[in-house]
Amino acid sequence: MKLASLYIGTVLCGAGVLAAADPTAWSKTSWGMSDAEIRAALEPGQVRDVAERLRVGDKVEPARVGIPKISIAGTDFRVYFLTDPGGLHQISLQPIDKADATDAVFHSLEAALTLKYGTPFSRAGETSLAQWKTSTSVIRLEFVALKNVPFKSLWLIYIPVPKSDML
């Protein structure tokens, strides 16, 4: 009986250590980093100061740190790191050229992300959506094309897994 208790305790403690030791957000960044820590974590010269305002849910937030150009699955993106007093809480990638906000680019990114993270939960309609979940992040790929309005949007968003889901 003592051996079984020791085994269960070891497994539970080990799971807690693994969850706490994997704070990766995107690339070399971690959730909760400050703007200065993000700059220090990434390649020198790669990160730039930006002054963008991005919609996050029902509010608009400033992005002060970003990467002007990174190529993913053959498309050039701009990366925005969103921080608040608690640190890094969202990473948003958007095509540099608005003409790249297409269904074809969505599917190209979805294929690349599926190779890395496995099969996503996805649904289609006016909004195409694919989501993946790692131990620390939710990765959301979204393409919106409104039929009656000339509006298209493509976003790749990383957010931390809610703490309640990490228990």
Image (cartoon, rainbow, N blue to C red):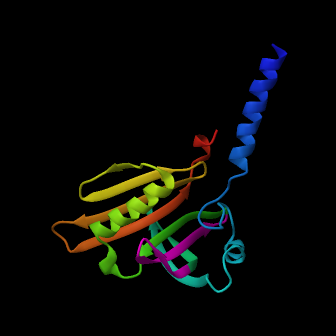
| Picture residue at 28% right of the left edge, 66% below the top | 103
Counting from the top left corner in percent of width and height, residue 58 is at: 43, 61
In this view, 101 is above or below 162: below
Report how many numbered discs are placed on residues in the image.
0
Name the residue: 62% across, 46% down.
163
Horizontal placement of 135 versus 15: left or right?
left
Can you say which quadrant of the picture contains the C terminus? Answer: top right
Image spot of residue 80 (x, y percent): 53, 74
Residue toward you, 55 or 27: 27
Outermost bottom residue: 45
Q: Quick check: is 82 in the magenta stretch?
A: yes
Q: Is residue 105 left or right of residue 79?
A: left
Q: Residue at x 36, y 65 (%)?
A: 108
User: In the picture provided, is 32 more to the left or to the right than 154?
Assistant: right
Q: Which residues are magenta?
A: 67-85
Q: Residue at x 45, y 59 (%)?
A: 113
Is 98 inside the magenta-drawn segment? no
Characterize the magenta stretch by its predominant secondary structure.
strand
Q: Residue furthest left?
A: 148
In the rendered image, residue 7, in percent from the top left (x then y), is placed at: 77, 25
Q: Position of residue 151 (x, y in %)?
A: 25, 72
Q: Indicate whether 81 appears above or below 21.
A: below
Q: Residue furthest front?
A: 115
The image quadrant where one finds the N terminus is top right
Residue furthest top as drawn:
1
